[in-house]
Amino acid sequence: MNNTTERMSSYRYRILAMLIYATTINYFDRSIIGVMAPTLSKMFDWTNDDYANIMIAFKVAYAIGMLTMGGIIDRLGTKKGYTLSIAIWSIFGMLHALVRPAFSIIGFAAARFGLGFGESGHFPAAQKTVAEWFPKKDRAFATGLYNAATSIGAILAPFVVGWIVSSSGHNWQIPFLITGGMSSIWVFLWLRTYKKPEEHPEISKTELDYINSDTLKVEQVKSVEKLPWRAVLPKRQTWAFAAAKITDAVWWFYLFWGAKFLAAQFDVDIKNIGVPFLIMYLLADGGSIFGGWISGAFLRKGWTLNKARKMTMLMCAIIILPVSYVAITDNKWLAVVLIGIAAAGHQAWSANIFTLVSDVFPKKAVASVTGIGGMVGAVAGIIGDKALGKVLDSSGNVGYFWAFLIAGSMYLIILGFVHLIMPKMKPLDENLNLIKE
């Protein structure tokens, strides 16, 4: 280590800033089509079922990628694995701009498929990075900060699209090209700055000691070299996380169907979608940061991991409940605020369930377990998309009533399942055996 001063350095926050930047690009990229959905549907004459099928192509690839990319990242390491992920999604994000009307459904589905596969590596890589650079007591807060950038990307998308794209859809290709430049800058910075903490010349011994301050001492346990998803699949803890990730379907409903709902219910178009999305996702940002902070505060008060995480998740589930009312109100701004509060609850929930993985599993298994959970969330999103598209085409806006009712009640039910599967959060050693207390 070149820097051996006892002064606490803070290089881990530069790494966190890179995660925030990557998450912003990720959600800007995936949000663009949702913002333009009402316009593109008119331009290309898509039914709701056609649009659902395009969204399903993204989630099928996301599910496949979650099973494979997590393991790839664990094997390649965070630096190379993350770079591969963002390179794939950037290329396919820009390929959206080449789609022509004659093959719009197939073309967009193919582009979304590639985008989904590349983006599936983001959260496994990001959470593995947090596990490498932050002690357990700070991981939920760090996760909440980078997870909040999902909202930054979602907020940027409607304003950029509204500024560049006309109401008739002219210049719709340009937003898809912007992320290529943003991603190139990220890859350059990432390759220059990232190393594991114990190998990095920029951090002090004091900071390294802090990062490793609550690492379990399991040196006496003989460690295996790799922990692919096949090794973590039988563990109950894996399925507790996977059950919690079913709620991803709700977040994707807000992201990909939110603009279509506001257009159908309140005649909100591409030129005035910015302010509703700003309100919704600023609230979501606050929820992500607060949700990460509050569980850390509970830990600092002396609560167990089990109590701190699950009580925070219970709080999230309760504040999400009122979103069930959205589809039956005729007040646009009330609907927007209720969706925003629910999105805040989801982001706080998400920050804590991501942290659950690194609380329980050794660092080398984090990406694989995150991938399995992401796959389950993607499958839930596929089912939701297909069902909603069919109901909207056959029964009109009544489909949104059922969608918001499920979105509001799902979290309490899922939390019950998580507690049944994993009543106590006990950490596993390097070979996935329970640590003896």
Image (cartoon, rainbow, N blue to C red):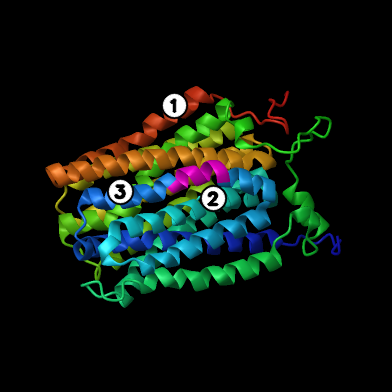
What's the residue at 64%, 37% (across, down)?
Answer: 228
Q: CA distance from mark 1 to mark 3?
A: 30 Å
The crowding category of the residue bearing disc 3, from other C-alpha atoms within 10 Å (few below 14, some 14 to 19, many at least 20), is many
Q: Quadrant of residue 248?
A: top left
Disc 2 + disc 1, Cβ < 8 Å: no
Can you identify the residue that label 2 sits on?
Answer: 123
Residue flagged by tag 2: what amino acid is it?
A: Phe
Give percent across and percent down for residue 14: 65, 64
Give percent across and percent down for residue 162: 30, 72
Nearer the camera: disc 1 or disc 3: 3
Residue flagged by tag 1: what amino acid is it?
A: Phe
Which of marks 3 and 1 precedes in the sequence? 3
Q: Which is nearer the eye, 80 or 303? A: 80
Q: Is residue 136 visible?
A: yes
Q: CA distance from mark 3 to mark 2?
A: 24 Å
Q: Secondary structure at mark 1?
A: helix
What's the residue at 16%, 49% (across, down)?
Answer: 329
Left-right relation of 170 to 306: left
Can you identify the residue that label 1 sits on?
Answer: 417
Which of marks 2 and 3 precedes in the sequence? 3
Indicate yes or no whether the magenta region holds residue 29: no
Q: Which residues are magenta?
A: 61-68
Nearer the camera: disc 3 or disc 2: 3
Residue flagged by tag 3: what amino acid is it?
A: Asn
Give percent across and percent down for residue 207: 76, 56
The crowding category of the residue bearing disc 1, from other C-alpha atoms within 10 Å (few below 14, some 14 to 19, many at least 20), is some
Q: Secondary structure at mark 2?
A: helix
